[in-house]
Amino acid sequence: MNETPSDLKFLDSHEWVKVDDNTVKVGISDHAQNELGEVVFVELPAIGDEFVSGDEAAVVESVKAASEVYTPLSGEVIEVNEALEENPELVNTSPYEDGWFFKLKVSDENLGSIDSLMTAEEYLSMLDGNS
Amino acid sequence: MNRTFLYESHQGLGSKFVNFSGWEMPIHYGSQINEHNSVRNSAGIFDVSHMNIFDFCGVEAKEFMRYVLTNDVNKIDDGSALYSVITNNEGGIIDDLIVYKFNNEKFRVVSNCSTFDEVNNFFESNIIKFDCEFHHKPSLGILAIQGPESETALKNILKLELSNYKSFSFTERNKLFISRTGYTGEDGFEVIGEPEELQNIWDLCISRSIPPIGLGARDTLRVEAGMNLNGTDMTIKNNPFESNLGWVVDFSDVERDFIAKENLLEIKNINKIKLVGVLLNEKGILRSGQKIIKKDFEGEVTSGTFSPYMKKSIGLARIPMDMSGNANVLIRNKLLNVKILSLPFIRKGKIMI
C-alpha cells in the first residue's frame, strides 16, 4: 500500500493531480493501480496536445484490461513520462512519484476548477464508502 | 454467489476475487505475471472446482457418446481421455469438453462453468433414446497441477508413480481421479475428488511452495497455448471449422451418426474462415473485438492479451481463410502491424513461432 500524499487532488475516476504554479502533473491513484493489476503498457499523449477537462488523454493497460486516463483540467501537454514506455510497471510500484503520466500547462483561468476536485482525505473516504 | 470449498484457503493466500459466471473465484494472489511464469518454468496449482462434472453410466453409454460428441470415443482405450465439442443441430458450438472413458458403459465429461444449463439440457434431451443415465456431480472438486515439475510434485504428494501415465490418460487411486490433462500447454494433471481429499492435496502443495494460480494466469496461459475459451473465441454462432477445431469432428467411421453430421460435412467443404494466432509487431495490447484488416479482407481479434512469457502482445483472431502473412490491427483509430501465425504460440515451455 502506497501512502496517499496529502498535497494531491483527486478525481472520482481515480486520477490524481499535483499543481505547481501553472504546471499540473497527472497520474492514477494507488487504489486504481491495485484494481488494474500489473500494468504492461501505457499510451501517453504527444507533447503539444491540447485537452479540455474530461478528455481521454492516456490509456493504461494491465494484463487483463485497458483503461482510459482522463485529464482533470484543460491545458496543453508539456511533458510526458517517457520512463513508462520501457517500465510501465512504475505505475504499480510508484503511482504517486515515478509512475506519473503527463504534465499540462494550465492557464490561470482554467486552474480555478482545481477547487472542484477532491482532497486526499475526501478521496479516501469516497473509497471507504464504496467498499 | 457460489464459492468452492477452497474459498477460505484462497482468502488466506491473499487472493483477489472475481465474479466468474456466478462463482467468486481467485483472479490472482498478488502477481498474475509471476503466477503465469511459475507454471511455464516450474509448477503451480489451480482450483477449478467451478467447472462441471457429468458422469454417464449404462449399457449404451458408448453409443450415446458417439452420438452426442463430434469427436469419436471409439478411438480411445479405457483409461483415456479425448477433447471434443458438442454442437446444436446446425453445427454451432454449445461447449468444448474433455470426455474420459472408464469402459464402454462408463464415461465422465468435464465441461465449462458458464454453460451448465445449455450442456445439461443438451445431455438431458438427447439421452432419452439411449439406455444410459447421467448425473451432475457438484459435490466433487477439481484441482489442476500444471507445469514441467508437476509430475515430480504430485508424485511426492500422492506417493504414486505417475511416469507411466501418458498425456490424456487417467487413473483412479485412493478416492481420487487423476488425469494427465490441462489447459496451459504444459505437462500437468487434473485431480477430481471429494473436498476433504483435495483440501489435503492443496495444503500439501502450498506447504511445498507450489504457488496457487488464479484465473488471470489461467487465461494468459491458455492464449499462449492457443486454446479456445468458449464464449470468447467461439459461441453457438461458430462452427468447429472456423474455430480451429476441425480436428475434433471425426467423420472417419462412415457408419457413425452424430448430431449435426450432415451439416458439419457441408460446412467443412464450404468454410472460408479460420481462427489463427496474431502477434503484435508494435507496442500496444491486442484485445477482443479489434478489427484485423488486410486489403479488402477483414477479421476480428477474439482473445487478446499481453504474453507474460514472450513479453509481447498476442491474441487469437477469426479471419478469412485467404488472409495470411502480415496484416493490420485497428487499435484506438490507429493501424498497427500484426503477424498472422498458426497456433500454438507456446508448447511445453518452447516458443513455437
Image (spheres, rainbow, N blue to C red):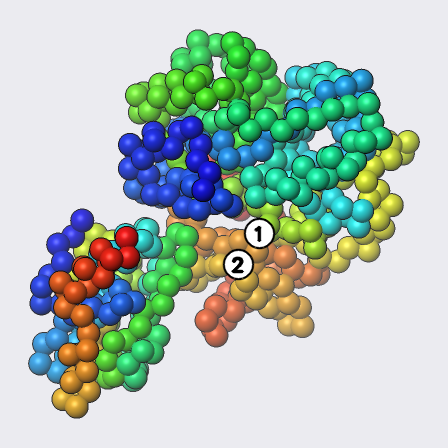
Residue B321: % across, % down: 71, 58
Which chain does the residue under circle 1 lie in? B
Please determine whether, in this image, residue A107 is positioned above or below residue A81: below
Residue B168 point in image, percent of width and height: 61, 25
Amino acid type, residue under disc 1 in the picture: Thr
Judged from the image, the secondary structure of the residue bearing numbered disc 1 is loop
Q: Can I make out residue B200 in this image? A: yes
Q: Which mark is residue B288?
A: 2
B106 with respect to B317 (left or right): right
* Residue under label 1: B232
Q: Residue furthest right?
A: B255
Amino acid of disc 2: Ser
Residue depicted at 70% across the width and 39% down the height:
B121
Task: For the residues labelled 2 and 1, say whether their Cβ atoms are less than 8 Å apart.
Answer: yes
Report the front residue among B199 and B221: B199
The mark lying in front, picked from 2 and 1, is 1
Which quadrant is home to the N terminus of chain B?
Answer: top left
Residue B339 is left or right of residue A83, and the answer is right
| Residue beneath the point at 15% across and 85% down | A112
Percent x, y for residue B337? 50, 65
Dot 1 crowding, Cα within 10 Å, few <14, some 14–19, many 20+: few
Q: Chain of mark 2?
A: B
Q: Vertical placement of B196 versus B138: above or below?
A: above
Specify whether disc 2 shares its chain with disc 1.
Answer: yes
Q: Nearer the viewer, residue B271 or A83?
A: B271
Using the numbered discs, state the Cα–Cα distance from disc 2 to disc 1 in whole angstroms. 8 Å
